[in-house]
Amino acid sequence: MNLNLLILVSTTIFSLGAIGLVLRRNLIVSLMCIELMLNAINLLLVSFSHYNNNLDGQILVIFVMVLAACEVAVGLALIISIFKHFKSLDTKEINNLRG
Amino acid sequence: MGFSLQFKLENTMESFIFYILSGLCIASAMSVILFRNPISSALALVVCMVGIAGIFVLLDAHFIAMIQLAVYAGAIMVLVLFVIMLLNVGSGYEIHRSKFVWGLVGLVILPIFTYLFWTQLSGISILPPTIKDTVNDGTVEKIGMLLFTKYLFAFELASVVILSALTGAVLIAKSNSKHNNL
């Protein structure tokens, strides 16, 4: 359980979240992929905080969680509003701003 | 070649649990983007978050692990599941056809990125010699002392952010009446 292995796990989870954000077309799954990336960053912050004997990283994790909760609340409200308007959650069909 | 896989197979119980938890996290993160039903991917995301909370416990961050379980796996995922069941979206497996190639490119880029990161970190010693005599685990007492002295202003600011996000979410979700069309 050295630091390189933790960085490898965190990078893999972050990349999986980014790939899912590009690939999936459901809006809710896109939001969950953003949550996955935020979790990977939290893991990286806590592991560096542990190996540097510094608690400031864990404080930063708390603020990341606060912002993630706000983002989920506003994002789900937007998703409900979009679903009422377009009757769909497919990002291929929500293209009113497309030139 | 400065790339050496330093899997020092420490046969301790700690590293054994760490391998199990990290494998669980990566497998469930894969199944988040591979399941075709959004409810299944939400439940896989819950498994990933519980695994990350276990890794937090292994890293002596007990308070963060508890917050991770309560906030992420509890509140946020219940909200996401509630919205999925409220909207009753179908279980179609939609993938961007044109962007699928770009996803494969990302899968090729991922080992290169990891390789660069790894060699960079093994060359430069970011870590101090980590004398662990000062036990610096994230208990509630130490986190609370730091949060209410050094980071007090950011803490108060976070409460303002939460309040504005709460009112904004209610406003956005309500403002779809007849005269106000989105």
Image: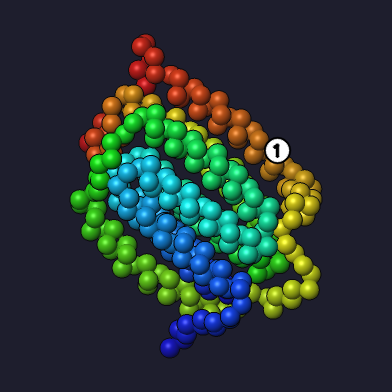
Q: Is residue B120 above or below residue A67?
A: below
Q: Quadrant of the C terminus of chain A?
A: top left
Could you tell me which residue is drawn at 63 percent across and 54 percent down? B65
Residue sitting at x 36%, y 29%? B87
The residue nearer to you, when weighing B57 against B94, is B57
How packed is label 1: few (under 14 Cα within 10 Å), some, or many (20 or more)? few
Q: Nearer the viewer, residue A16 or B34?
A: B34
Q: Tell me the residue that label 1 is attached to.
A: B156
- Is B77 left or right of A26, judged from the image as shown? right
Left or right position of B80 against A86: right
Q: For the residue labelled by badge 1, is the local secondary structure a helix, a strand or a loop?
A: helix
Displayed quadrant of residue B142: bottom right
Residue A49 vs residue B125, the one in the foreground? A49
Figure quadrant of the N terminus of chain A: bottom right
| Residue at 47% from the left image edge and 72% from the top image edge | B117
Question: At which x and y percent is residue A89?
Answer: 31, 34
Residue furthest to the front in view is B13
Q: Position of residue B66 (x, y in %)?
A: 64, 50
The mark total stands at: 1
Q: Is residue B135 visible?
A: yes
Left or right of A58 on screen, residue A86: left
Which residue is rendered at x = 50% and y = 38% of the image?
B78
Residue B123 appears in the figure:
no
Amino acid carrying mark 1 in the image? Glu
Query: Does B144 sit left or right of B42 as displayed?
Result: right
**Residue B107 higher or lower than B7, as above or below:** above
Q: Coloured how?
A: rainbow
Give the residue at the far bottom of this rendering: B1
The image quarter in which residue B30 lies: bottom left
Residue A41 lies, in percent from the top left, at 53, 57
